[in-house]
């Protein structure tokens, strides 16, 4: 039975032009990610992980090749159309969390839904429910600087998933976290993947993240050198 993939890249290249130099950051990438996958893009520093995630997250466009999102060819889409798709269908977890310092955890979590024009009561309810599910029920009224790094990271995840996007993209999600927090963050994302069918695509060179993925896409020098399925280890600790 044919299913629509969340993301499909066909012969995608990304070339950065720097003054008179050209840098070929992604080379002939063919990649399909189906709905409900839990995938990591792994590879050494400079191999192109962030560049690839930026294309998948519709934050940047290929220099050549075709990119399909949810079955739709995005070649030639306007920046307004891409921004709308990002807002409505994709959740982002960045390394630096990017929480708004003047907003509480609850308000930060509501933000994306507010951009979508969701009614206040509805978005507040969804945000509170997500924060509670992430163990932040008591901390919803705190500002980011009143939360630990791990708690801020969980708010960033809450913000990414509260609006039930089709896809969540996380760039090096555990980069600044101690082992225990990293482990519980991965548990949480695996749970959201299992229970809500949200597709997750991570970039990482952290073995703690890589071992948890169901599929590992290995990048080297801008090309995919291996794709490996693996039995996901799920820990239910905590
Ligand atoms: N805007 C840009 N202009 C020019 N070169 C760029 C640009 N963005 C990335 N690059 C180059 O493309 C290559 C891939 O970068 P990218 O950030 O995707 O790597 P990465 O695998 O995410 O690395 P890291 O693990 O260190 O974050 C690097 O050599 C980088 O210098």
Image: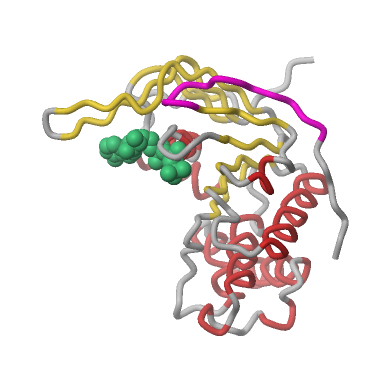
Name the quadrant of the C terminus. Answer: bottom right
Residues shaded magenta: 220-231
Q: Residue 220 appears at what percent x and percent y?
A: 48, 26
Judge whether 53 appears above or below 164 on screen.
above
Between 162 and 210, the residue placed more toward the observer is: 210
Residue 142 horizontal/vertical position (percent)? 59, 84
- What's the residue at 47%, 61% (across, down)? 96
Magenta region, mostly helix, strand or loop? strand
- The percent coordinates of residue 113 (x first, y second) are 57, 60
Looking at the image, residue 23 sits to the left or right of residue 155; the answer is left
The answer to whether residue 41 shows anywhere in this view is yes
Q: Quadrant of residue 46?
A: top left
Residue 85 falls left or right of residue 60: right
Nearer to the camera, 75 or 48:
48
Residue shown at the point (67%, 59%) measured from the top left: 182
Can you say whether 37 is above or below 133 in the image?
above
Position of the N terminus, as image quadrant, is: top right
Q: Residue furthest right?
A: 236
Above or below — where is 169 with respect to 115? above
Colour scheme in use: secondary structure
The residue nearer to you, when weighing 10 against 127, is: 10
Q: Classify the position of ligand 1 by quadrant: top left, top right, bottom left or bottom right.
A: top left
The residue positioned 61% from the left and 75% from the top of the image is 106
Q: Is residue 82 visible?
A: no
């Amino acid at each position: 039975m044919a299913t629509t993939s969340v993301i499909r890249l066909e012969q995608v290249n990304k070339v950065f032009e720097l003054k008179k130099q050209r840098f070929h950051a992604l080379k002939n990438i063919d990649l399909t990610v189906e709905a409900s996958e839990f995938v990591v893009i792994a590879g050494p520093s400079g191999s192109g992980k962030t560049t690839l995630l930026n294309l998948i997250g519709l934050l940047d466009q290929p220099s050549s090749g075709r990119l399909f999102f949810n079955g739709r060819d995005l070649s030639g889409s306007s920046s307004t159309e891409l921004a709308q798709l990002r807002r409505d269908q994709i959740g982002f977890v960045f390394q630096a969390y990017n929480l708004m310092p003047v907003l509480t955890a609850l308000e930060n979590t509501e933000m994306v839904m507010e951009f979508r024009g969701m009614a206040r009561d509805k978005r507040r309810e969804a945000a509170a429910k997500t924060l509670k599910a992430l163990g932040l029920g008591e901390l919803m009224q705190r500002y980011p600087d009143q939360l630990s790094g791990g708690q801020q990271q969980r708010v960033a995840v809450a913000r990414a998933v509260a609006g039930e996007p089709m896809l969540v993209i996380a760039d090096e999600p555990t980069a600044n976290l101690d082992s225990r927090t990293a482990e519980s963050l991965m548990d949480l994302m695996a749970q959201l993947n299992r229970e809500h069918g949200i597709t997750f695509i991570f970039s990482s060179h952290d073995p703690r993240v890589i071992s948890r993925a169901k599929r590992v896409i290995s990048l080297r020098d801008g090309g995919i050198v291996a794709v490996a399925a693996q039995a996901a280890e799920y820990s239910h600790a905590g």
